[in-house]
Amino acid sequence: EKVLLECKNLKKYFETPKGMLHAVDDVSFKIGEGKTLGVVGESGCGKSTLGRTILRLLPSTDGKIIFDGKDITDIKPKDMTALRRQMQIIFQDPFSSLDPKMTVYQIIEEPLCIHKVFKNKQERTERVAELMEIVGLDRRYFNTYPHELDGGRRQRIGIARALALNPKFIVCDEPVSALDVSIQAQILNLMMNLKDKLGLTYIFITHDLSVVKHISDDILVLYLGKMVEMTSSDSLFEDPLHPYTKALLSAIPIPDISHKGKEAEIMKGEVTSPIDPPEGCRFAARCPKATERCFKEMPEFIEVKEKHFVACHLYN
Ligand code: SF4
Ligand code: MG
């Protein structure tokens, strides 16, 4: 199996007035061509930052990113354009960054114009129509504005735009989180069909484990920038090992880490912050199984069963 993407000890830190924010902290994995890696965790755990760092939308602090056999960690701006055609992103709300006065046609056409893929307007129009067809949209929407469409159709446009340049790899950042549950399944099905048909490889970012259960080959669970568990989707759901993964699966409420609202007020001073994090396991303040050792010593990320990795002192 060919490895399309590899991250080696990837780190992304941000300087903040309060200290150094460890958004992505020593993340390593490989994704085989045509596979889907689900990346799961609560908001603020570093998922989106990981996705953006891999796409080189953000510079990394340390570590390596190997894409299609090439080290792209320190890619030069002049080589970025070619890479951008290979690697794309689908957002939760693809329109927040777009001009609301753009029509559906213009939104899908824009990457084709920027990258000068076609010589003339007619070729571009054919490509836009083809892209709309593969995401299940009629060309009668050409001159529609996204705000006139429902969430599912808007996300289809976001997908068509991401596919415009024939990428190999797509970071899907919470692409169904804003949609009604009934529409979520349709969009997930579409994305999986497109993956097979076009030979795509996905990183699928979500806060909701149930969303990635059926679509991921492997799942990586992140907690405050750290890898806490990684294995196949089947083995994660059959035998979750890390207390944080178990909490995510059981839907038992665990104290909020967002530092917003009442609950966070109560937890103040107890929940670990990703800013200048203390020694020890980052989940310790919330973990029902925590011992003294957990607050002092960071657990290593180790293989405890075949192809099942976990960072927790319970297993070491
Ligand atoms: Fe809980 Fe300790 Fe395991 Fe961290 S290392 S998850 S605190 S038991
Ligand atoms: Mg996010």
Image (spheres, rainbow, N blue to C red):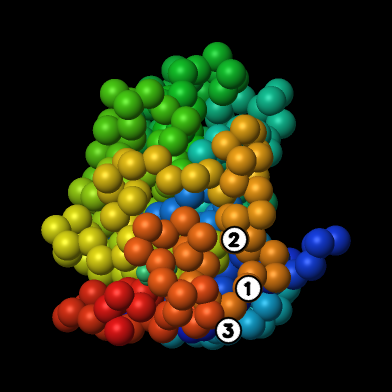
Q: According to the image, label 1 marks what residue? A: 278
Q: According to the image, label 3 marks what residue? A: 63
Cα–Cα span, label 2 and label 3? 24 Å
Left or right: 262, with 227 as reference point: right
Figure quadrant of the N terminus: bottom left
Residue at 64% in and 45% down = 259
Which amino acid type corresponds to the residue marked 3 in the rendered image?
Answer: Gly
Left or right: 2, with 162 as reference point: left
On the question of residue 82 being in view, the answer is no
Which amino acid type corresponds to the residue marked 1 in the rendered image?
Answer: Pro
**Quadrant for ligand 1?**
bottom left
Sooner in the amino-acid sequence: mark 1 or mark 2: 2
Q: How many marks?
A: 3
Figure quadrant of the C terminus: bottom left
Q: Residue 314 at x, y = what percent?
A: 30, 75
Sooner in the amino-acid sequence: mark 2 or mark 3: 3
Q: In this rendering, is residue 169 above or below 261?
A: below
Q: According to the image, label 2 marks what residue? A: 272
Cα–Cα span, label 1 and label 2? 8 Å
Cβ of mark 3 under 8 A from ligand 2: no
Dot in front, 2 or 3: 2
Q: In this rendering, is residue 33 above or below 171?
A: below
Residue 147 found in image quarter:
top right
Cα–Cα span, label 3 and label 1? 22 Å
Sooner in the amino-acid sequence: mark 3 or mark 1: 3
Residue at 69% in and 65% down = 275
